[in-house]
Image (cartoon, helix red, strand yellow):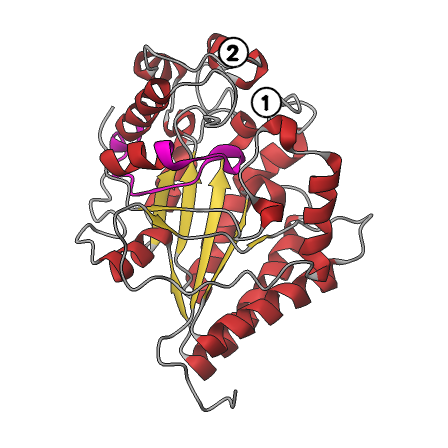
């Protein structure tokens, strides 16, 4: 397609970040084992906000509800009475809450209120949900009623910051139609679905075999499946709107020398989306940038430099997830919370 010919509908670039700190890693690594990434995440968040501001990038920060608190005592008062009863008890964080630090200063791995206040203070940055307790929807013995209670607690926690949650990302990318129905009932207008490939279908933890993980890793660099660009529907039979993921941005590693392959894969897909008026959705965790922050920010800037060219050539736009729901579903909710005054605790 010639550079001077724009698609009828502009392409859309979406970025979402899974903001979880140790709550998303606690059953895999201890805080001390992952310390460099977790401490580095507290530098990565303001660095990312600065880059997003410089490039006028609208992003969604899908946040575990536990992070909204300054103090353990406030978190304890908000815990739902009905909690998940996973067969694998390691997945539930509730047994560990009493043992975390007293506040964010003492325990920067499990609280992030100050970082969320920074995000909330930036225009076009959406604070969304990653459930309250990093809830795993497909794990054995979890229940729909416990999931509903979890989302209610998440919305209560966010309201303390003056945030109304509109978008949701499912931990472990686990969800089904029943959970989406609950989200719709609770006012969510968008969710991040999985890439539309069998390789990325929702799976339990036990189903995440070495073969599946290896194939996804290879797909990050070698395009095993497709560009993962999507045409958004002109309307939806209901909300939440599926805003499928396209690519997980893998952080720089000094022992893995294929970053240029990943950048080329992402840029090619972005170009395809821009030329044909499709959506491309990139995601990662802030703690992924916690180590080698300069290298990772440099990689992100190169991707965003490419996006700027596509924005100029094809009119490609940057949306957060809630903004896409507003455009497509005609929702009247605010895409970014306009009340930026935190609720006094």
Front-lying residue, 141 or 39: 141
Q: Secondary structure at mark 2?
A: helix
Q: Is residue 74 left or right of residue 13?
A: left
Q: Position of residue 276 (x, y in %)?
A: 46, 76
162 in magenta: yes
Q: Is residue 292 left or right of residue 68?
A: right
Looking at the image, can residue 304 be seen?
Answer: yes
Q: Is residue 254 left or right of residue 287?
A: right
Question: How far apart are the two marked residues, 2 and 1, measured between alpha carbons?
Answer: 10 Å
Q: Is residue 254 above or below residue 306?
A: above
Q: Position of residue 194 (x, y in %)?
A: 50, 47
**Residue visible at 22% across and 28% down in the picture:** 344
How many dots with numbers?
Answer: 2
Other residues around mark 2 within 10 Å, as few (<14) / some (14–19) / many (≥20): few
**Residue visible at 71% across and 58% down in the picture:** 221
Q: Is residue 72 above or below residue 285?
A: above
**Residue visible at 35% across and 75% down in the picture:** 9
Q: Position of residue 119 (x, y in %)?
A: 38, 45
Q: What range of the chain is rendered magenta? A: 157-179
**Residue visible at 31% across and 12% down in the picture:** 77
Looking at the image, can residue 163 be seen?
Answer: no
The tag on residue 26 is 1
Task: Give the quarter of the figure containing the C terminus.
Answer: top left
Q: Which residue is mark 2?
A: 96
Front-lying residue, 215 or 10: 215
């Amino acid at each position: 397609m010639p550079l001077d010919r724009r698609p009828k509908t502009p392409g859309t670039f979406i970025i979402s970040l899974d903001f979880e700190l140790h709550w998303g890693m606690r059953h895999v690594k201890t805080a001390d084992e992952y310390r460099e990434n977790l401490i580095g995440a507290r530098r990565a968040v303001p660095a990312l906000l600065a880059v997003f501001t410089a490039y006028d990038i609208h992003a969604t920060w899908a946040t575990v509800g536990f992070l909204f608190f300054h103090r353990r005592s406030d978190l304890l008062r908000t815990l739902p009475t009905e909690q998940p009863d996973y067969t694998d008890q390691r997945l539930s964080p509730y047994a560990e809450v009493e043992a975390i630090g007293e506040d964010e200063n003492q325990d920067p791995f499990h609280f992030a209120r100050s970082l969320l206040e920074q995000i909330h203070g930036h225009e076009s940055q959406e604070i969304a949900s990653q459930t309250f307790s990093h809830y795993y929807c497909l794990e054995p013995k979890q229940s729909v009623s416990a999931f509903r209670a979890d989302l209610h607690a998440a919305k209560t926690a966010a309201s303390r910051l003056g945030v109304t949650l509109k978008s949701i990302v499912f931990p472990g990318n686990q969800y089904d139609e029943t959970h989406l129905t609950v989200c719709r009932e609770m006012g969510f207008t968008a969710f991040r679905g999985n890439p539309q490939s069998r390789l990325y279908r929702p799976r339990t933890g036990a189903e995440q075999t070495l073969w599946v993980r290896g194939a996804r890793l290879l797909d990050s660099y070698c395009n095993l499946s497709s560009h993962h660009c999507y045409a958004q529907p002109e309307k939806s039979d209901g909300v939440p709107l599926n805003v499928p993921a396209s690519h997980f941005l893998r952080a720089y590693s000094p022992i893995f020398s294929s970053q240029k392959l990943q950048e080329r894969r992402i840029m090619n897909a972005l170009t395809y989306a821009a030329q044909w008026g499709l959506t491309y959705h990139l995601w990662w965790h802030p703690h992924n940038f916690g180590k080698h922050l300069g290298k990772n920010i440099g990689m992100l800037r190169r991707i965003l430099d490419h996006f700027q060219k596509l924005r100029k050539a094809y009119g490609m736009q940057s949306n957060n997830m809630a903004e896409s729901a507003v455009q497509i579903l005609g929702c009247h909710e605010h895409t970014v919370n306009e009340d930026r005054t935190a609720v006094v605790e």
